[in-house]
Amino acid sequence: MAEDAASGGWSTIESDEGVFTSLIEQLGVKDVQVEELFSLNADWIRALSPVYGVIFLFKWIGHGSENKGAPQDGSYDRAAVEDEGLFFAAQTIQNACGTQAVLSVVLNNDQSVDASSSGADASGARLDIGPALQEFKDFTTGFDAALRGESLSNSEMIRTVHNSFAKSSPFVDETLHDPRAATSEDVFHFIAYTCYHGKLYELDGLQPYPISHGDCTPDEFPDKIMTVLQRRISRYPEDEIRFNLMVVCQDQRIKWQQLQDPGMLAEEERKREKWDFENTLRRHNFVGFTEEVLKTVVKMKIQDGSYDAWIEQGKQATEKRVREKMGKAGA
């Protein structure tokens, strides 16, 4: 199918903190967490320290900046990849862009990167990315962005973990397409921001090179990233509010263990349990289960002679909700 060719075998996954946290952990990264922010507030980022970067989801608007030789904001920095070892990969599969954005943060903040020049704070906390991702990073060292993108898209290990978080559905999703394709439908795109070698970088797989937003230390990152994001958001209509910002940070349970705060530690544990439960639900298709339950209920209603009254009661309840909804709309 055309859809299969376009997706390259990668399924769509949700932009969700629990999904991305579990995804990173299953790829082998230790002591990491993704937290969603609901406000452009630098203090909220500082509260999650150490922070390794952020992931930003926004409505894609093609602007062809690549053809002009310069991005709309910041400047291309080709040397960051060629001379300084910044991990940057071109996006070759649309459905992989969320996972690619996460990896753009993780692979530029691993233990092989100088802590003083990347996203760690004064504590020098680095990420242990595990043997599988370390092998992938070592294998792609020296590749250009296009070849790195192809390597990522063709990684069976990364694709398998990614697809394990896809929603189970009995229906074919015919809405998936390349964000650069001509279409009237809204398409959303993930990019990453991280501090590397004393600069703030925007890592967008649809751009030809990393984009530098100037000098930035880890301590300056929270304020600097807010300024950059506010400039980006200001280019959208005032009524456009469909943005999502997630912070890649250290596992917050470590912080509360060190601070000996059992209340906050318990809250983080409850959050993890909630994420695990939601991720389990995502992996299952409940259509067949729901159908069988409904069949059983109908059979019971027919047997006890209450089927007609049950149907009539349902109709009345539905009509009541419709009237109430129309009444609110006309108010």
Image (spheres, helix red, strand yellow):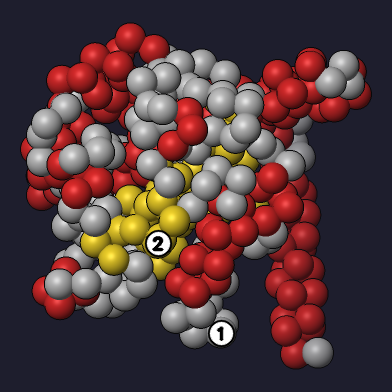
Kind of element beneath mark 2: strand
Vertically, is 137 above or below 116?
above
Decide if residue 291 is in sight here.
Answer: no
Q: Residue at x 68, y 38 (%)?
A: 48
Residue 286 drawn at (x, y percent): 51, 31
Total label count?
2
Distance of label 2 from label 1 (alpha carbons): 24 Å
Judge from the rendering whether residue 264 lies leftward or rightward of residue 54; answer left or right.
right
Q: Which residue is mark 1?
A: 238
Left-right relation of 192 to 7: right
Q: Position of residue 87 (x, y in %)?
A: 27, 37
Residue at point 89% right, 21% down?
261
Choose the circle earlier in sequence order: 2 or 1: 2
Question: Which of 176/292 is in front?
Answer: 176
Q: Nearer the viewer, residue 185 or 42?
A: 42
Which residue bears the numbered disc 2? 213
Residue drawn at (59%, 52%), measured in percent from left and top? 220
Query: Mark 2, residues whose alpha carbon is within 10 Å: few (<14), some, or many (≥20)?
Result: many
For the question of whether residue 210 can be seen, the reply is yes
Residue 82, above or below 265 = below
Coordinates of residue 285 in the picture (x, y in percent)? 46, 30
Instruction: Indicate the amino acid at tag 1.
Output: Glu
Residue 124, how many percent across, how many down?
Answer: 56, 26
How many residues crowd mark 1 within 10 Å: few (<14), some (14–19), many (20+)? few
Q: Is residue 267 positioned above or below 40 on the image?
A: above
What kind of residue is marked 2?
His
Q: Where is the C terminus found, in terms of image quarters?
A: bottom right
Mark 2–mark 1 CB contact (< 8 Å)? no
Q: Indicate the quadrant containing the N terminus: top left, top right, bottom left or bottom right.
A: top left
